[in-house]
Amino acid sequence: MRTLLIGLLLLAVLPCGASADDVVKLVTFPRLRPGAINPYELALLHEALERTRRDYGAYDVQPFTENVSIGRAIELAIEGRLVNVLSAGVGQSAPSPEWNMIPVAFPIDKGLLGYRVAFINRRSQNRLLRVHSIEELRQLRIGQGSGWGDVRIYEHERIPVETTYDYESLVLMVLHGRFDLFPRGLWEVAPEFAEYGTRYPDLAVEQHLLLHYAFFEAFYVSRSTPRLAGRLTAGLERMVADGSFDAFFARHFRKLLADLNLRERVVIELENPFLPAWVPLKRKELWFDPARLP
């Protein structure tokens, strides 16, 4: 069904016989399905481009679906031939895309990537209910992927971190007590638990804590297509101005966020000193706030 919806969306992007003023070659990084395109990011890209059709003209979206590493995808996006737009966590990857691409200064996920709920061994839940502060969090161990941008945030806060390159190894490590928490971004939890929860019955979503640091997904545009960076910026800003961005976000994430019982959780704030200067942290209207959930 998801493949059909994406196909219909792509057909809607460019009317038959029309010539495209902008060709958008998008790559995203869903962890569980290499080569897949994140449907939220594809739909948001379409919405932003539609808001600018009158000013910029027609467009054609060509998702890049080959199974390549994050590093290779960034190289391709910098080159701008096979890929000219990528979505990635800001400061998440090496080589870091902000060095050689044009960042669109807009948190396309409203910063959900920086709100973290953890996978745990279900037998650990009662013990974790006693954690209420960053000092108590420092007595635990966190599991993360090698090279993930989150690692240096935890290290900056003096929280012990265990790393490995393989996602499933992280699941096995938390189940076997190598570390206590495997934190995931809010929009990552449901699909990853659906993938691994049935295979590993002791895997559980921790119910007490909500970790938060400034961390988010953004679009990066190849320097070979600067016009496209301006177009995406204009389209996203128009969505904010007319309220459609908040409505779009709510349609995609309202149930997911409600299911995680965010209001009932203890929030532990962590500092992220590694964000680039262009990040619009002072624009509160662009960021998710669990206290404002309906």
Image: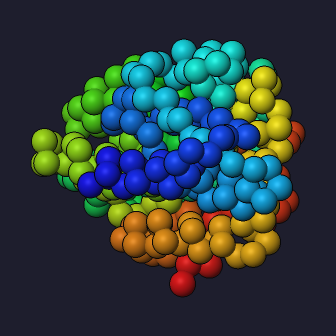
Q: Is residue 138 above or below residue 144?
A: below
**Image position, residue 121 (x, y; %):** 24, 46
Give the image location of residue 157, x and y in percent.
Answer: 64, 39
Is residue 188 left or right of 197 when viewed as pictured? right
Q: Quadrant of the C terminus?
A: bottom right
**Relative to 153, is 124 above or below?**
below
Q: Is residue 268 left or right of residue 188?
A: right
Q: Quadrant of the N terminus?
A: bottom left
Q: Name which residue lies at 71% across and 39% down.
A: 22
Relative side of 29 to 22, left or right: left
Could you tell me residue 186's position as x and y percent?
47, 56
Residue drawn at x 47%, y 19% as measured from the top left: 69
Of residue 287 and residue 158, the one placed in the foreground of this image is: 287
In the foreground, 250 or 56 = 56
- Residue nearer the viewer, 270 or 101: 101
Question: Is residue 174 found left or right of 19 in the rendered image?
Answer: left
| Quarter of image, res 133 | bottom right
Q: Toward the viewer: 266 or 58?
A: 58
Q: Residue at x 85, y 59 (%)?
A: 282
Identify the image's colour scheme: rainbow, by chain, secondary structure or one colour.
rainbow
Q: How many numbered markers are drawn?
A: 0
Residue 60 visible at all: yes
Q: Residue at x 62, y 78 (%)?
A: 292
Q: Quadrant of residue 109?
A: bottom right
Furthest toward the front, the residue is: 17
* Spot occupied by residue 219 in the image (x, y as percentages of width and height): 67, 41
